[in-house]
Amino acid sequence: MEPYDDEEPPLAIAIDDVVEDKTTPPSLVEQRDNLRPDLPEAQPVGVTVITGYLGAGKSTLVSSILNGQHGKKIAVILNEFGEEIGVERAMINEGEGGALVEEWVELANGCICCTVKHSLVQALEQLIERKERLDHILLETTGLANPAPLASVLWLDDQLESDVRLDSIITVVDAKNLRYQLESNHDSSSFPEAYNQIAFADVVILNKVDLVSSDDSGVALKDLEKDIHNINSLATIIRSVRCQVDLSIILDRRAYDVTHATHLEALLKENRNLSTSDLHDSGVRTLCISEPKEVHLEKARVWIEELLWDKKYGMDVYRCKGILNIGNSDQLHTLQAVREVYEIVPTRKWRNDEDRVNKIVFIGRSLNEEILVNTIKATLCNP
């Protein structure tokens, strides 16, 4: 068997600099509207954030996509800004005087790859302004262990003016070493990345399953999947060897699109208990609460802000997703949050056969079910 090489670069052909003219060209949307105002509005390009512990296989995943014959025009951004520069600096559009993306390559299958040293915003805008319409953008977080800040900015931040949308967060984990990373460092800070990256993931690729002992691989892999779901029971788990996965499974998931019916219906129909681990476990886990009575929208906002912003009850909420039954409204509202950034929006009308209940899934550290169940009652329209 060939050894895994997580740093093997894709074959690439250098192309000319993308930005030579200092004037700001019209966006694709503006160009299209000027030519054909009757055309429907263009859909934003999806951005998938790929993260994973060192050696897990995320570079192998990116390389296979860049070299694959999938018929899609995909751009891959390899960031190099890292912790020393910080997300705040990376997400600032520095304008004409800022550092442009210096390394652009075009692959034989039509995909584009670039390395970003400073401004991610600028890289995204340059990609969108290219003449060729992109099908998708992948962002490999080589320098950041925690994907949350990037997710927050790509999702709702006003700094990003490009016509893009956060599609999902994919975390690649090493099946052979994951158990060690989780178990031996449960209460330490040695491998906080392993917990964070799984907690924020929409999809977890359980890679290198072929390296798990063959005599008990079935049981061992199921136990690993249980460990992952104990941290994040909302994540979809995909087993893989050398990160060979079906692109249709990992792209266009629309995990942050509140109107996407798949995620909404799954939460509505979820009957099993999503809560995991013991009540007073201080580790990263999933917790689900339900409240049958109508809640007041503004009171619900105050409650969420106290949890996310003030950490009023000592809980560290990484993500939350839920459905809300708002008083004096026939609209089903959805709640979604990544760290301090959240939104509550009406999604569609409640159906007659649906149980109009509030159901919220929390993923985080030091979650307390009793406090959450009791404090949500302060948001009720008729306590």
Image (spheres, grey):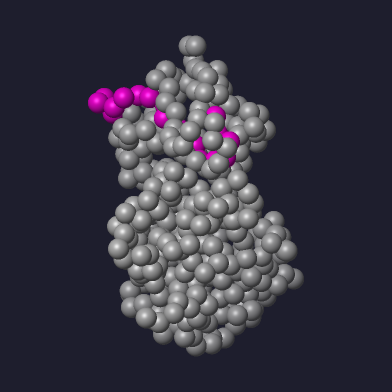
Residue 22: where, in percent of width, then height? 67, 75
Using the rendered image of the protein, determine whether residue 34 is visible from the camera's viewpoint.
Answer: no
Q: Residue at x 64, y 51 (%)?
A: 189
Residue 121: where, in percent of width, then height? 62, 63
In which quadrant will I find the N terminus? Answer: bottom left
Q: Residue at x 47, y 69 (%)?
A: 57
The residue nearer to you, when weighing 272 against 136, is 272
Using the rendered image of the protein, determine whether residue 233 is visible from the camera's viewpoint.
Answer: yes
Whether residue 352 appears in magenta in the rendering, the answer is yes
Residue 203: where, in percent of width, then height? 41, 55
The residue nearer to you, when weighing 134 against 66, is 66
Name which quarter of the figure residue 258 lies in. top left
Outermost bottom residue:
13
Name which quarter of the figure residue 109 lies in. bottom left
Whether residue 260 appears in magenta in the rendering, the answer is no
Up the image or down, 316 lies above or below 106; here it is above
Residue 136: where, in percent of width, then height? 43, 65
Q: Residue at x 69, y 62 (%)?
A: 83
Q: Residue at x 59, y 56 (%)?
A: 191
Outermost left residue:
353
Bounds of the magenta segment: 351-368
Outermost top residue:
382
Up the image or down, 122 lies above or below 334; here it is below
The residue nearer to you, when weighing 32 against 316, is 316
